[in-house]
Amino acid sequence: MNRFVSKCFAANLGGKRVGSRYLCGAAAAGASSSIRQSNHGQEQQCSGTGIAQYDVAIVGGGMVGMALACSLASMALTKQLNIAIIDSNPALVNGICINKEDPPDPRVSTITPATISMFRDIGAWQYLQQYRHAYFDKMQVWDYTGLGYTRYHARDVDKDSLGCVVENKVLQSSLLLCIQNAAIQKKIFPSRLVSMSLNPGLKSKRMDGICSEISRVDLTKLQLSDGTCLYAKLVVGADGSKSQVRELAGFKTTGWNYSQNAVICTVEHASENQCAWQRFLPAGPIALLPMGDNFSNIVWTMNPKEALDRKSMTEDDFVKTVNHALDQGFGPHPTPSLLGNGNILSWFRASVATSGNGGFEIPPKVLKLASERMVFPLSLRHANDYVSKHVALIGDAAHTVHPLAGQGVNMGFGDAFALSRVIGEAIAVGMDIGEVSLLKKYEAERKPANIAMMAILDGVQKAYSVDFGPLNILRAAGFHAANYISPLKRSIISYASGEQRLPLFT
């Protein structure tokens, strides 16, 4: 964790120096005036006789990019903008069809109460509610040593739920329906970004027979793989961890690959699971997340060789290994004997947490596999800068994290909503929405919050990667403290829920 924070701090200093069965939904501030061309495509002459101009070009029409578009469409100050969404995914044009009778897709996100609130504000939650989603109000976390555990409950913070598990395709479809029905000028370009260039040099534009002087010096020119070209006042890179916008704009990153892969899949139980479970094992954590209708999602972190073995083994063998990992495999169930059932914390007795009085529970048994098993590598990456002139990064284009707490997509949604607010503030005072001094306000809000979350997640990952007696005792003490000290428990829940910036006592 210290390694990550110090690297980010050094990078920041450097930056300163320079209803029906089927539901279908149709680098630095002084950046060079010429942004390099992608190696993935050849320079082509722009097709058509005129080049369209947009206020915002969002490169990447995934969940985070669509959330930005919906947020801009929902605010009075920004709903008059003209938006371009660039993504080669044909589903954005053809629509996303979801068969409600199919088992859940293994690619899911756990969205926090703060994200849910923002989805309601932008009008996307009404579409999401038509699909399968699963709230959970309890969470249990423990490790293989049997020395400690923590149980969280929504009632600890006077809430109805701790979060909601939603398939990524459901989130995507809901946001797509939201933007399709929004009263904002938008166009989806089913293509890939090939090149970007600042200061194209054109000086005027004729509209309705009237010559309107528009300085093209304040625009960015985008060229797409199908030959289309367009201009934009602001280009937003929402195109994932391998961001083309980040590469073309010359943003540098800090980070590393973990020697871990994640195995994800959908499993089925005899009855509905309503709790989120996470157990830390010697090779990495395994999470069991409720998805409704007797289904749960598995996210199991392990070394790459083990991941390939788990993916290739028979279904019956895989189910046995999952149940083994969630029950008494690798070690016993936790007992309260180590710290005397919280008595060692008796000086906090007046603040004993509500859910701390509940005992350890065994997760529901997995009966069978309900989807394919998918494997993907894990890494940590963070852009040293989020913005430059006329360019901003959001979501995985700006940061990628370990999935152990399910925070990655919530961080991305936080970026999207923060950027839309800053754009609205610029319009209110007549500023250029691509002005770097304005965009730095977005960076100043989101970068510290993201670095803090990334450092915590990286620290937890490293702390549970070592099997060492004294460290095991310290981890157990941490479990017990979180389980029995109400101020600490409330702070942890509030921070993980996106409602508190830093995990401090309240």
Image (cartoon, helix red, strand yellow):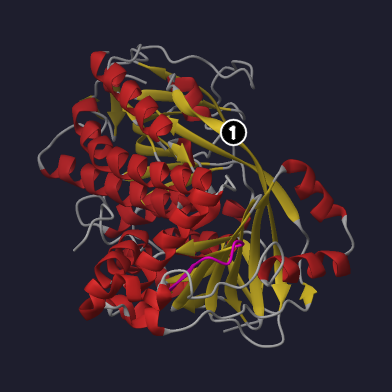
In the displayed structure, would residue 381 be above or below residue 97? above
Quarter of the image where the C terminus is located: bottom left
Q: Relative to residue 270, is residue 139 drawn left or right?
A: left
255 or 239: nearer the viewer: 255
User: Residue furthest toward the right?
Assistant: 314
Q: Is residue 145 magenta?
A: yes
Q: Position of residue 403 (x, y in %)?
A: 54, 51
Q: For this view, does 438 lie left or right of residue 65? A: left
Residue at numbered disc 1: 257
Q: Using the image, determine if residue 345 lies above or below residue 255.
A: below
Q: Residues within 10 Å of mark 1 (few under 14, many from 20)?
A: few
Q: Position of residue 381 (x, y in %)?
A: 49, 34
Note whether residue 441 is visible. Answer: yes
Seen at 48% across and 83% down, the residue is 359
**Residue 382 lies in the magenta-colored region:** no
* Numbered disc 1: secondary structure: strand
**Image point 72% across, 66% down: which residue?**
329
The kind of residue on which mark 1 rests is Asn
**Could you tell me residue 430's position as x and y percent?**
12, 37
Give whichever of 422, 85 is nearer the camera.
Answer: 422
* Vertical placement of residue 432 versus 16, above or below: below
Residue that protrudes farthest toward the left in the picture:
429
Q: Quadrant of the N terminus?
A: top left
Start and end of the magenta stretch? Answer: 144-151
